[in-house]
Amino acid sequence: MSNKGKIAVVTGATGGIGFEVAKRLGTDGYTVILNGIEDEEGAKRVAELTALGIEAEYRGFDVTKEDAVASNIKAIGEKYGKIDVLVNNAGGLGGRSRFEDMTTDFYRFVMALNLDSVFFASRAAIPFLKKGEHPSIINYTSNAGWTAGGPGAGIYGTSKAGVHAITRALAKDLAEYGIRANAVSPGTIDTDFHKQIKSTKPEVFASWANNIMLGRLGQPEDVAGVISFLASKDAAFITAETIQIGGGQALGI
């Protein structure tokens, strides 16, 4: 089945996993709308995709800002007449803080970045997903959603547990329209997400592979391939699922 004429929106797509996902969906034939907050980087990424023959455009907006998300998703939907895939890729650790010292602002920021963003974008996209072909929403949870995160990452874990739940809730809510909702749960993927530890403690970073059954860190392409599948007609009977992409890391060794 051709994906030509199909529309994919990927948030947080100016680097890391998000860009690889956008590139893969573009290679699959989708017109890809990349979101981000670094406009210069966004323009560069669109140029890269265009050079590969991919139809792409960039829209700069902050996924934590309700009005900006609503107006931009609406504009995309109205321009193309539909949205076929929404990939809620934007998110992050936001920093580390123990609960005793945690400011309310930090708490709200991490929850907004990881959970509000999924709600805002999904809500805005639903009217246009209803017009899509085999439409679906794909979210990102994390092993931290089950383990509650490492030291200082408790609110990150809490927000990702929320993403796990909202994915299933969206699947229930949207099934009658034929809109599927699934999530991926990437393990340790070699991206800028880990650049601080990679530059300051390279031996610690390298040792992480020892805790992964398949003996290596993940690559952004590993995630992009699964998202390509979840967006495709091959996954037409899969909804409310979370796929672990961690080389067996979630089971421990």
Image (tube, rainbow, N blue to C red):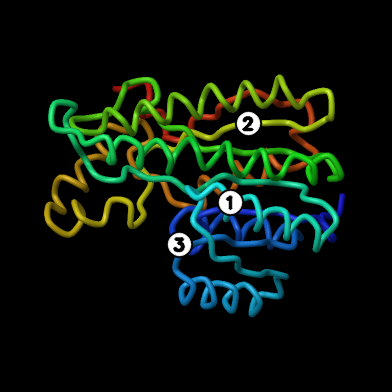
**Of pointers 2 and 1, the one earlier in the residue sequence:** 1
Q: Would residue 236 appear left or right of 184 to someone viewing this image?
A: right
Q: Number of callouts in the render? A: 3
Q: Would residue 100 appear left or right of 8 to someone viewing this image?
A: left
C-alpha gap between disc 3 and disc 2: 22 Å
Q: Would residue 116 appear left or right of 231 to someone viewing this image?
A: left
SS under mark 1 = helix
**Of pointers 1 and 3, the one earlier in the residue sequence:** 3
| Front position among marks 2 and 1 | 1
SS under mark 3 = loop
Q: Is residue 244 above or below residue 86?
A: above
- Residue that numbered label 2 is attached to: 182
Q: Position of residue 208 (x, y in %)?
A: 24, 39
Q: Would residue 142 appear left or right of 43 to someone viewing this image?
A: left
Give residue 67's mark. Answer: 1
SS under mark 2 = strand
Q: What residue type is labelled 3?
A: Gly
